[in-house]
Structure formats: structure tokens, C-alpha cells
């Protein structure tokens, strides 16, 4: 009986060791990177990102709600005329309209950690800090252009649409969407196809997407006039 | 006797499990440099002599006599890959252009890359009218790329499969030049143009410096017009020891020998950075900026069987903060390269390791602050960025502190 137990134990240890050695050798054996199985993700990537986009005009209430969603209380809508177009060339409808920095909200608008990006066409960052004065700070009730980028087919009406820009143009009044190819002098937008630009209704200024930011052309860009502060 | 049989059988079954049970977790890949002395560290892929030679060749300035041009962007690899040390990043961008006809992207005549320099003014490339798709691309970090090359393609596909469908990265396979065109999971370049460092090195040598090699034997044109630098091709010729070209193979040796971009350990240890690290996951940044990837096992043959993963690169855990997959985050450059038209507005997730050395952010370098770069994300990243928007300013600062430690 004792002999049998000893034999069993020895055999078990030997088998265990042999199994371990064989497995270790198998694990270390050279092997070829296996071919990748067909992509399960492919159909997702072939879907169009924007289908039948809604470029219908913005109603005042929904435009105000969208501005509130993106900017909170930092800005106040001053023009009910809102421009709807594809300003950044992704096919999704975007919204733009004239706003003002809310009373007591100038610092919030300019906050470097704000949920929007400020583009300054009135006093752009100095290329030479000695030769140019520091940009004038945003002031309360300053006229601004607010742009809200769309998300998918619903565009700016989508509750998830919160990518927003504040453009300092120094221009009062409404803005409208115009086809970009009506302005052949504008540099093409990097990386995207032809889309819309924002044209000031009165002063002739144009604001357009330049890839990662908005840029200005016309009076808005070249204006040396101090930013108008509304009463 | 019956008991004996059962015991032996059990032992045989248990035996294979034992090595797994005692296997240690994959160790972290070594750092590319020691911040104390700012010198590159060889990860063990090559001998010290080989590494020194490869680093010299990587930083070597090429001349017209050596085949530079006829059109090119830089005179050495290190001109674009240097910050904070050879192999790192730089502020240098390249220019790409083409035309979108409403359905498909069409390359600019001569290819989407518009070289910024030429050995003769007559060869100078310029963007031609009608090519309204234009973009700049920043140069990328190459430190630690040997570990990226050693990731099994199936691991990348698995990462994609585990991402939510609305954020699922696109995995593409591209030809491996040195393997006769065998295809492998792409991982290098803003558009995931390459899967192997040898293919990448040969491509960059001809496209960025104008030097041909056996894998890329033809010089570039000037806006589609054939031109010559007068040097017989391939300029980096094959030799018995270096069938893919001496320089190209040494470039690959250099990149395969570097460690991974090290973190700022002092900043990483701060309470703010640690809180920011948690927020990074909480917000969902880590879905695409993947924290941990383990390389293929030592001994695995990759790149169509042409490279055996050595001990220095195999079974290592890396923290790239990237998934090496293509995504549309609303910033896409409009250019199509290896991935087909569905990749037109997609770019590879930027690996965030080493990004503390970068001041111009996103693929085009157009975003100058972390907050701006984060807010530029849209498309597949919309829900994640909206979660970021819901953070307080203090939390945003913590997250940015974490990013600054990478």
C-alpha cells in the first residue's frame, strides 16, 4: 500500500513537471502573428455621418435655447435673426447669431477654461509683443458672434451639440449664411470641402472657418476701430 | 491503481496551467531617457555600438551628393524628430493637399504631399489651383515605436471591438514593404499609413528627404512632373548585410532600440495630477487614449514573418494613451492615404505619451492650449467632451495637470 502511494506521488510529480515543461516550451516556441479576423467594425465606419441634415431656419426660441445650452449665462442673444449653415464643412447644420457678453460676464466669456473657444478678430494675439499692444480685454455687453457647431444630422438642434466659438468681430447687427464660393478671395478651409461663411448684414465683414479656428475678412478683420460697447 | 490513474491524469491536466499560474504580469517598457541626464537609453534591442551608430545615422544631415531631393522637407530624420532628444517630436509640419469631388478625395498631382524644399528652384512644388483640401501635419514622436511595432495586430483589433459602437476606432491593414506586401494592422503615421518601422523609414526617407532605397526605389515628382537629382536610384542601396538599404535599416534599428517617453514623475505624483488621472477615465478619454497595451510575446514573428519580437520588446506593457486606430473627431484632414475613402476625415488617435514636449497640438498644430485642443474634439468624441464640459474649472485644471505629466 505504501509502495503504491509513493509510486502515485512520484508519477504525479513527474506528470506535473512534464506538463509544465511542455507548456512552457510551447509558450516560448516561435509563432507567427495570426491574421486578423474580418473587421466587425467595418459597417459602422461605412455609415454616413450626416444623413438628410436639417438646415431649416432657426426659430427664435430654439436658437436662444441652443445658445443657453452652449454658453449658459455668459452671453445674451441680441438678434433673433440666426444664421444656419455648414460653417465648418462637416455637413452638419451649424448655428450662428449675434450676442453680447452678458452683464458682469466678460470674464466668464474670456475664461481660458471656458467651454467654448474665443477667436479675436478685433485685436488678434500680437505677433510681436513689443510692436503691438496687448489685446483689449472683452468687456461687458460687447457685441460678439456666437457659433454653435452641429452634431450629426440634427446639427445644432441636437442636445449633444455643444462645440462653440465666440468670435470678437467688433461688428453690430445680424449675420447671415452665404455660400463660401461667393467669396473666391477667401483661402480654402484646410481639410474640408466647400461650405458656408458668415457675412455681416451691414458692414460687409466675413467670418469663415479656417480649419481649427474662425478667421475674419473685410472690415471685421482689419478694423482699427475700438470695440463698440453698447449702452 | 485506479486512484493512481486519477492522480496522474489530474497532474497531467494541471501541469499546463502551472506556468500560466506563475507567470508574472508584463513588466513596463523602459523609459527613453533619464530626465536627470537627458541621454537616450537603449532598450536592449541593439548593442551599445549599434545603437550609437544608428542614432548618428538618424541625426545625420544628408546632402545633394548623397541623394537629397530633388524635392524634400528636411535634411535629416532628427530635423523633425528631435524634441527633447533625437527621436522625439518637433514643431515641424508637412503640407498635404488634394481635391474633394463631393464623393471621393483625389490626390494633388504628384501625390498629396507637397514638399516644402527642392534642390533646384525649378523643382519647387506648390499647391495647384483646384486643390482646395489642404492641411498641415505635425511631425510625430518615434521614441518607443519599437514597442508599438511589437503590438500584435489582433490586440489593436480587439481594442476597436471593445469600444462603444459610436466611438469604435477603424482598424486598417496596410502592406508591409519588406514582406512582399503582406498586410498587417497599421499603427504609424497620422493616417495609419504603416505597420512596420522599416516600411515607415523607407517611406519617410524618400518622401521627407528624397532619398530612395530598395523599398522605395523611385524619386518623387514635382507636382507630377518627373524630375531627377542625378544620383542613380536606389540612393540608399542594398548590401548583403542590409538588403533594404543601410540607412533605412539603421533608422529602424534606432527606433526599435529606444525606450518609451517617460512621464514627469514629480508632477505625476501630485494630488492634482492623480485626481486628473481619475477624471481622465471618468470623462471617458481613455476609451481612445488607451492607457495600457501589452506587446506580443517574445518570439512572435511579426511584419509578415520578417521580424522576430526580441526579449527587449516582447511581453512589455506600454502606456501610450492611444489606441493606434483611426477616428473621426471632427478635426479630420480630408486626406485619403492607405485606408480608403471612409478614412478621409479620420486621423489616428494621437498617443499622448511624451505630449508634454509638444506646444502645438492636434494633427495640424493649430490648437495652442490643452483646453482648446480638448474642445476641438467633436464627432465620435462628442459625448466624452461634453462630459469634460461638465467638469468644474478646478477639475479641468486637474485633468490638464495630468496631461502635462505625460
Image (cartoon, coloured by chain):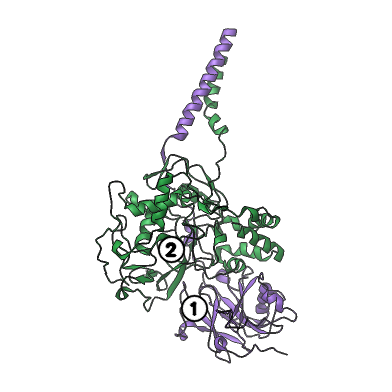
Chain colours: A purple, B green
Could you tell me which secondary element the residue under label 2 belongs to?
helix
Alpha-carbon neighbours of circle 1 within 10 Å: few (<14), some, or many (≥20)? many
In the picture as drawn, the residue positioned furthest to the bottom comes out as: A202
Residue A53 horizontal/vertical position (percent): 54, 73
- The residue indicated by pointer 1 is A195
- At horizontal 66% and vertical 89% (from top left) the residue drawn is A228
- At horizontal 38% and vertical 68% (from top left) the residue drawn is B112
Q: On screen, B287 above or below A160?
A: above
Q: Considering the image in quadrants, where does the N terminus of chain B appear?
A: top right
Front one among A225 and B322: A225
Q: On screen, B224 above or below B304?
A: below
Label count reads 2
Could you tell me which secondary element the residue under label 1 belongs to?
loop
Front one among B264 and A3: B264
Q: Considering the image in quadrants, where does the C terminus of chain B appear?
A: bottom right
Q: On screen, A136 above or below B190?
A: below
Left or right: A49 as drawn, with respect to B66: right
Residue B174 visible in image: no
Alpha-carbon neighbours of circle 2 within 10 Å: few (<14), some, or many (≥20)? many
Left or right: B338 as drawn, with respect to B165: left
Labels 2 & 1 near each other (Cβ < 8 A): no
Mark 1 — on which chain does it sit?
A
Residue A204 horizontal/vertical position (percent): 55, 90
In the picture as drawn, the residue positioned furthest to the front comes out as: B37
Badge nearest the viewer, 2 or 1: 2
- At horizontal 45% and vertical 61% (from top left) the residue drawn is B191
- The residue indicated by pointer 2 is B79
Distance from disc 2 to disc 1, alpha carbons, whole Å, reads: 36 Å
Amino acid at each position: 500500500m505504501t509502495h503504491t502511494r509513493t509510486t502515485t506521488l512520484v508519477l504525479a510529480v513527474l506528470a506535473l513537471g512534464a506538463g509544465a515543461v511542455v507548456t512552457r516550451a510551447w509558450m516560448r516556441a516561435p509563432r507567427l502573428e495570426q491574421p486578423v479576423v474580418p473587421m466587425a467594425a467595418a459597417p459602422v465606419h461605412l455609415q454616413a455621418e450626416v444623413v438628410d441634415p436639417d438646415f431649416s431656419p432657426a426659430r427664435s426660441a430654439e436658437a436662444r435655447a441652443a445658445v443657453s445650452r452652449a454658453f449658459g449665462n455668459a452671453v445674451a442673444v441680441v438678434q433673433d435673426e440666426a444664421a444656419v449653415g455648414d460653417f465648418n464643412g462637416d455637413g452638419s447644420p451649424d448655428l450662428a447669431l449675434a450676442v453680447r457678453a452678458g452683464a458682469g460676464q466678460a470674464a466668464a466669456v474670456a475664461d481660458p477654461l471656458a467651454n467654448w473657444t474665443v477667436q479675436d478678430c478685433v485685436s488678434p494675439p500680437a505677433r510681436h509683443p513689443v510692436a503691438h499692444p496687448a489685446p483689449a480685454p472683452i468687456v461687458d455687453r460687447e457685441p460678439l458672434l456666437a457659433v454653435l457647431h452641429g452634431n450629426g444630422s440634427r446639427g445644432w438642434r441636437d442636445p449633444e451639440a455643444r462645440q462653440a466659438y465666440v468670435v470678437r468681430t467688433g461688428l453690430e447687427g445680424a449675420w447671415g449664411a452665404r455660400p463660401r464660393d461667393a467669396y473666391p478671395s477667401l483661402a480654402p478651409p484646410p481639410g474640408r470641402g466647400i461650405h458656408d461663411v458668415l457675412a455681416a448684414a451691414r458692414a460687409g465683414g466675413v467670418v469663415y472657418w479656417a480649419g481649427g479656428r474662425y478667421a475674419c475678412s473685410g472690415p471685421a478683420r482689419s478694423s482699427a476701430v475700438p470695440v463698440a460697447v453698447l449702452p | 491503481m485506479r486512484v493512481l490513474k486519477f492522480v496522474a491524469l489530474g497532474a497531467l491536466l494541471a501541469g499546463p496551467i502551472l506556468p500560466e499560474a506563475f507567470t508574472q504580469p508584463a513588466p513596463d517598457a523602459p523609459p527613453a531617457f533619464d530626465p536627470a541626464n537627458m541621454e537616450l537609453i537603449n532598450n536592449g534591442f541593439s548593442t551599445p555600438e549599434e545603437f550609437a551608430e544608428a542614432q548618428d545615422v538618424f541625426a545625420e544631415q544628408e546632402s545633394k551628393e548623397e541623394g537629397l531631393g530633388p524635392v524634400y522637407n528636411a535634411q535629416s530624420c532628427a530635423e523633425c524628430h528631435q524634441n527633447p532628444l533625437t527621436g522625439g517630436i518637433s514643431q515641424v509640419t508637412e503640407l498635404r493637399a488634394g481635391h474633394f469631388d463631393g464623393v471621393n478625395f483625389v490626390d494633388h498631382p504628384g501625390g498629396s504631399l507637397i514638399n516644402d524644399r527642392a534642390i533646384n528652384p525649378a523643382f519647387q512644388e506648390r499647391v495647384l489651383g483646384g486643390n482646395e483640401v489642404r492641411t498641415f501635419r505635425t511631425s510625430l514622436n518615434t521614441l518607443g515605436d519599437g514597442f508599438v511595432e511589437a503590438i500584435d495586430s489582433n490586440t489593436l483589433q480587439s481594442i476597436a471591438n471593445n469600444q462603444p459602437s459610436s466611438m469604435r476606432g477603424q482598424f486598417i491593414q496596410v502592406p508591409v514593404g519588406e514582406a512582399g506586401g503582406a498586410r498587417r494592422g497599421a499603427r504609424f503615421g497620422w493616417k495609419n499609413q504603416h505597420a512596420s518601422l522599416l516600411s515607415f523609414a523607407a517611406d519617410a526617407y524618400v518622401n521627407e528627404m528624397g532619398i530612395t532605397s530598395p523599398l522605395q526605389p523611385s524619386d518623387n515628382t514635382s507636382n507630377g512632373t518627373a524630375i531627377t537629382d542625378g544620383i542613380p536610384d536606389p540612393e540608399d542601396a542594398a548590401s548583403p548585410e542590409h538588403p533594404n538599404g543601410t540607412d533605412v535599416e539603421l533608422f529602424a534599428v534606432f527606433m526599435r532600440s529606444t525606450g518609451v517617453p517617460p512621464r514627469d514623475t514629480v508632477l505625476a505624483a501630485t494630488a492634482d495630477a492623480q485626481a486628473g488621472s481619475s477624471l481622465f477615465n471618468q470623462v471617458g478619454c481613455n476609451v481612445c487614449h488607451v492607457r495600457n497595451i501589452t506587446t506580443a510575446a517574445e518570439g512572435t514573428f511579426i511584419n509578415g514573418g520578417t521580424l522576430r519580437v526580441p526579449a527587449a520588446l516582447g511581453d512589455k506593457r506600454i502606456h501610450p494613451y492611444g489606441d493606434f486606430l483611426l477616428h473621426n473627431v471632427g478635426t479630420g484632414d480630408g486626406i485619403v492615404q492607405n485606408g480608403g475613402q471612409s478614412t478621409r476625415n479620420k486621423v489616428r488617435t494621437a498617443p499622448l505619451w511624451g505630449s508634454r514636449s509638444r506646444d502645438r497640438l492636434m494633427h495640424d498644430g493649430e490648437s495652442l492650449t490643452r483646453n482648446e485642443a480638448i474642445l476641438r474634439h467633436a464627432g465620435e468624441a462628442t459625448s466624452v467632451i461634453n462630459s469634460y464640459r461638465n467638469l468644474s474649472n478646478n477639475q479641468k485644471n486637474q485633468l490638464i495637470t495630468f496631461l502635462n505629466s505625460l
